[in-house]
């Protein structure tokens, strides 16, 4: 598992990319997809995920859709057009950062 400090700066990018690739998702679904994609190496806690989702929503990158399922209410998150355009930029920026860090740390990327 990766340290929470490493995830702090990447969480928005992770959430944006997962939503871009998988469309409308609810919080638990996002955590499970990230866990699956990371081969169980990244665990998003509610305490990290929901503030990130709320911040992205406040910035206009996400919108929510509420669905009643029996007696429960499920909140789905979906990218706005602004969010969709931001994903490509954020992913490219992060990929460049990874290359830069590999150079700084003098490690080979597999």
Image (tube, grey):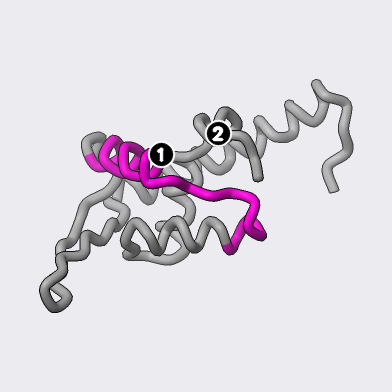
The residue positioned 32% from the left and 65% from the top of the image is: 24
Do tag 2 and tag 1 residues touch (Cβ < 8 Å)? yes
- Judged left or right of residue 57, residue 20 is right
Q: Does the magenta stretch include residue 90?
A: no
Residue 100: x and y in percent read: 73, 27
Residue 25: x and y in percent read: 34, 63
Quadrant of the rendered image containing residue 64 = bottom left
- Judged left or right of residue 87, residue 25 is left
Q: Is the magenta stretch mostly helix, strand or loop?
A: helix
Placement of 79 over or under 71, stated as above or below: above
The residue positioned 60% from the left and 32% from the top of the image is: 6
Number of residue marks: 2
- Extreme residue toward the front, this view: 71
Residue nearest the viewer, comparing 10 with 5: 5
Mark 2 residue element: helix
Q: Cα distance, mark 2 to mark 1?
A: 9 Å
Residue nearest the viewer, comparing 68 with 81: 68
Dot 2 crowding, Cα within 10 Å, few <14, some 14–19, many 20+? some
Residue 1: x and y in percent read: 65, 45
The residue positioned 48% from the left and 39% from the top of the image is: 11
Placement of 104 over or under 69, stated as above or below: above
- Residue that numbered label 2 is attached to: 4
Mark 1 residue element: helix
Q: Which mark is residue 98?
A: none
- Extreme residue toward the bottom, this view: 70
Placement of 15 over or under 67, stated as above or below: above
- Residue that numbered label 1 is attached to: 48
Q: Give the range drawn in magenta.
A: 36-57
Residue 57: x and y in percent read: 24, 42
Quadrant of the rendered image containing residue 106 = top right
Of pointers 2 and 1, the one earlier in the residue sequence: 2
């Amino acid at each position: 598992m990766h340290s929470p400090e490493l995830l702090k700066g990447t969480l928005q990018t992770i959430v944006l990319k997962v939503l871009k690739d998988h469309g409308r998702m609810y919080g638990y679904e996002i955590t499970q997809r990230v866990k699956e994609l990371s081969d169980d190496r990244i665990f998003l806690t509610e305490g990290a995920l929901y503030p990130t989702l709320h911040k992205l929503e406040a910035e206009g990158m996400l919108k929510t859709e509420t669905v009643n399922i029996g007696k429960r209410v499920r909140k789905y998150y979906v990218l706005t057009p602004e969010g969709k355009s931001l994903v490509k930029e954020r992913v490219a920026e992060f990929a460049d950062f990874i290359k830069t860090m590999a150079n700084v740390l003098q490690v080979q990327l597999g």
